[in-house]
Amino acid sequence: MAHEEMTRSPLIDVQNLTQKIGPQEILRGVDLSIYAGETLVLLGKSGGGKSVFLRHLIGLMKPVEGRILFEGQDIAQLNERQLEPIRRKIGMLFQDGALFDSLNVFDNVAFPLREHRQRNEKEIRDKVYESLSLVNMSGHEDKMPVNLSGGMRKRVALARAIISPPSVILYDEPTAGLDPIVSDSINKLIRHLQKQLQVTSVVVTHDMVSTNHVGDRVALLDRGKIHFWGSLQELASSTDPVVRNFVEGRSDENNDIE
């Protein structure tokens, strides 16, 4: 991968990304390149800034400093109207699914199309059914979110994220709160969609099982900076104590509990 990266431009290039929330510096100069067609897993402790990083990639947060280049364009400098065509290329699976409780499955998935003023109901219906089929949720169109399991909610939210379809999918803790069997099905779905849609995926997680299942490349966010990046093999063979503590689920006894 290293030689290949030197010969092509990244699809998303994050440079010196800095973000503060109140007095706390969450991201302290993050540099990270994401290449077309890969699944990049961003690891890190809970509360360490992973989700904050993800929100910058879709323009939901503006950096204090730094640049976020998407296909060479700095999206950090764009206003809401200018961001719209960029966002159409990016699907996002929020951690809680973020479904509309007042809408059934069909209308939740159709929402982005109607939001973009698509009026052809037959075309909307065809796209909704296709998206639900891709995430193995056919036949659940009339159900309300309250009647769905956690795994089903994630699948519906994913169907909504891919209905455009996007060139990039961002996953915020896709297996959080799910049992191991459902988590495994979500991991398989992430891989399936990457191949089926030829998308670039960024998966934010602290789940090592998920990382090993879906990742092509891995980055570890620690203390607001990228501490490690490389292949799954390089992650597994790293002797860096910060990497080993995270991979093996050990607390750092030299640090205060966060």
Image: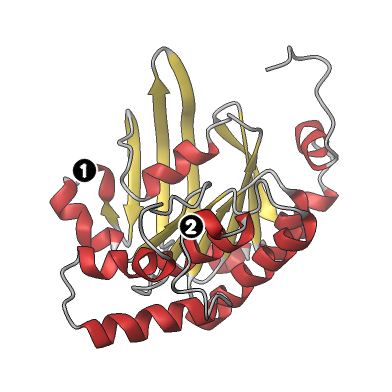
Identify the residue position indicated by label 1 in the image. 77
Instruction: State the image coordinates of residue 90 (x, y, percent, origin top left).
Output: 37, 62
User: Do tag 2 and tag 1 residues touch (Cβ < 8 Å)?
Assistant: no
Q: Secondary structure at mark 2?
A: helix
Q: Nearer the viewer, residue 123 or 21?
A: 123
The type of residue carrying mark 1 is Gln
In the rendered image, residue 237, in percent from the top left (x then y), is placed at 84, 50
- In this rendering, the count of numbered labels is 2
C-alpha gap between disc 2 and disc 1 = 36 Å
Between discs 2 and 1, the one toward the N terminus: 1
- Residue 257 position, x and y percent, is 73, 15
Residue 45 shows in the view: yes
Q: Which residue is mark 2?
A: 145
Residue 242 or 83: which is nearer the viewer?
Answer: 83
Looking at the image, is 212 positioned above or below residue 198?
A: above
The answer to whether any part of residue 7 appears in the image is: no
Q: Position of residue 69 (x, y in %)?
A: 33, 52
- Residue drawn at x 33%, y 73% is 164
The residue at the point 71 percent across, 55 percent down is 211
Report the side of 220 relative to 193 (left or right): right
Tell me the crowding category of disc 1: few under 14, some 14 to 19, or many 20 or more residues within 10 angstroms, Cα based: some
The quarter of the rendered structure image containing the C terminus is top right
Task: Give the image's coloring scheme.
Answer: secondary structure
Q: Residues within 10 Å of mark 2 (few under 14, many from 20)?
A: many
Image quadrant assignment for residue 18: top left
